[in-house]
Image: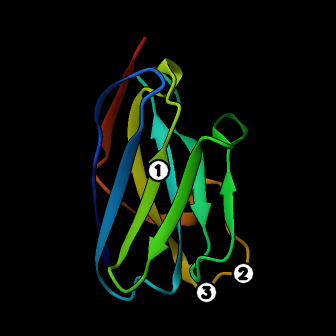
Amino acid sequence: QVQLVESGGGLVQAGGSLRLSCAASGRTFANNNMGWFRQAPGKEREFVAAISWNGVSTYYVDSVKGRFTMSRDNAKRTVYLQMNSLKPEDTSVYYCAADRISWRTVVSTTSDEYEYWGQGTQVTVSS
């Protein structure tokens, strides 16, 4: 089992920045690809970013490329999502997730491949 706890959400004006953190506990964290997803009211959950288990590869949805950066610190068992130049359309509940398969070579962008989920943190961007 992997337990995930997100933090760092809040209210920010358009153009501002936030850094989300996701702390992991439980079984080995360093072996699993990690992802960030978000879900706005009335919408489906969507992929935001993912990072390989070794931190070498990162992937982003087109709408956040150049603005968001995902990173991880395996020693601290934490992943981060640095969000800059925030827009009102970024308003959502953000969830971190851990891949259910260790050392997977292909980093998934679909929620079906992620077994462990945090409780979510609200990000609200005002215009």
Q: Disc 3 to disc 1, how far (Cα)?
A: 24 Å
The residue that mark 2 highlights is: 105
**Residue in the foreground of this view, choosing between 112 and 5:** 5
- From what the image shows, is residue 124 above or below residue 2? above
Please state which amino acid type lies under the numbered disc 2.
Thr
Indicate which disc, 1 or 2, sits on the residue closer to the N terminus.
Answer: 1
Could you say which disc has been placed on residue 82 in the image? 1
Q: Position of residue 67 (x, y in %)?
A: 60, 40
For label 2, the crowd category at 10 Å Cα-Cα, with few meaning under 14, some 14 to 19 and many 20 or more, is: few
Mark 3–mark 1 CB contact (< 8 Å): no
Q: Is residue 47 above or below residue 54?
A: above
The residue tagged 3 is: 103
Q: Is there a contact, CB below 8 Å, between mark 2 and mark 3?
A: yes
Contact between labelled residues 2 and 1, with CB atoms less than 8 Å apart: no
Q: Which residue is found at the position 38% from the left and 49% from the top?
A: 19
Q: CA distance from mark 1 to mark 2?
A: 24 Å
Q: Is residue 38 left or right of residue 118?
A: right
In the rendered image, the quadrant that contains the N terminus is bottom left
